[in-house]
Amino acid sequence: MGQIDCILFDLDGTLIDSNQLIIDSFQHTFKTHLGLDVPATEIVHTLGRPLVEILRQYGADKADDMLETFCVFNETRHDTAIKLFPQVKETLTELKSAGIKLAVVTGKRRRLAWRGLRLFGLDAFMTVVVTPEDTSLHKPHPAPVNKALELLAQRPENTLMVGDSPLDIASARAAGTYTAAVNWGVVPLRFMLAKQPDFIIQTMPDLIDICLLKPQV
């Protein structure tokens, strides 16, 4: 393993605990427009894809109306319904102090992604934030990760992608970076393991061990 000098993070479910809000927002939207009671276990497997893409999967002819409903429900609850996962800021502080570049590669819309980052002061850590508006292809395609690497002038073999979805791992692996799956997301670990991530991390400080303390070979 080469020296890791850049870490790309997914946002929702990785740095910010917003999964329940997202699930509630989808369930409210599908019930309102389609009369569907979609179980959380089904919604979980769509997470990581762009919002509009998911809505079109369920009701292409009503996607615009569903988008509006989702956004109103989600954004009016956003700031009080989400929180940081434990030890996120402490870990980012140590990594950034060590000279590691930090960035976000998310399926979340740009405006709301930045809103969440600023809410917790995470924007100060991130050199680059890649959102669905930045690429025409999305996770699991490597395009979002490649875009981040391009903006950072970063080599994939010196980069680690951290995420809570199989889509994160697939996208990063296709782009040639190392991969780390978090074990605090809502996606069952077996689905993450099926994508063969290089690391499974139990807590955020595990990244310090991976990137700063373990000898590189």
Image: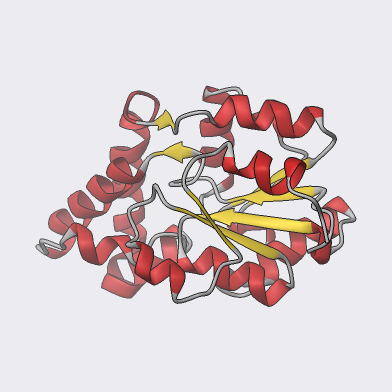
- Residue toward you, 165 or 205: 205
Q: Is residue 61 above or below residue 30?
A: below
Reply above or below: 100 against 60: above
Colour approach in the figure: secondary structure
Q: Position of residue 92 (x, y in %)?
A: 66, 32
Image coords of residue 46 (percent x, y): 36, 66
Question: Is 62 on the left or on the right of 155, as rendered?
Answer: left
- Taking depth in this image into account, of 116 and 30 the one nearest to the observer is 116
Residue found at the far right of this picture: 153
Tell whether 55 sits left or right of 140. Answer: left
On-image quarter of the C terminus: bottom right
| Foreground of the two, 179 or 19 | 179
Tally of numbered tags: 0
Could you say where residue 23 lies in the image, as x and y percent from the top left?
Answer: 27, 50
Quarter location, residue 132: bottom right
| Residue 49 is at least partly visible in this image | yes
**In the visual, does 53 lie left or right of 210?**
left
* Residue at 69% over, 70% down: 143
Looking at the rendered image, the quarter that the N terminus falls into is bottom right
Specify whether 120 is left or right of 65: right
At horizontal 85% and vertical 35% (from top left) the residue drawn is 99
Above or below, 47 relative to 176: above
* Percent x, y of residue 7: 71, 49
Question: What residue is shown at x 60% (from left), y 22% (from top)?
Answer: 121
- Which one is in front, 168 or 141? 168
The answer to whether residue 139 of the structure is visible from this angle is: no
Name which quarter of the figure residue 114 lies in. Answer: top right
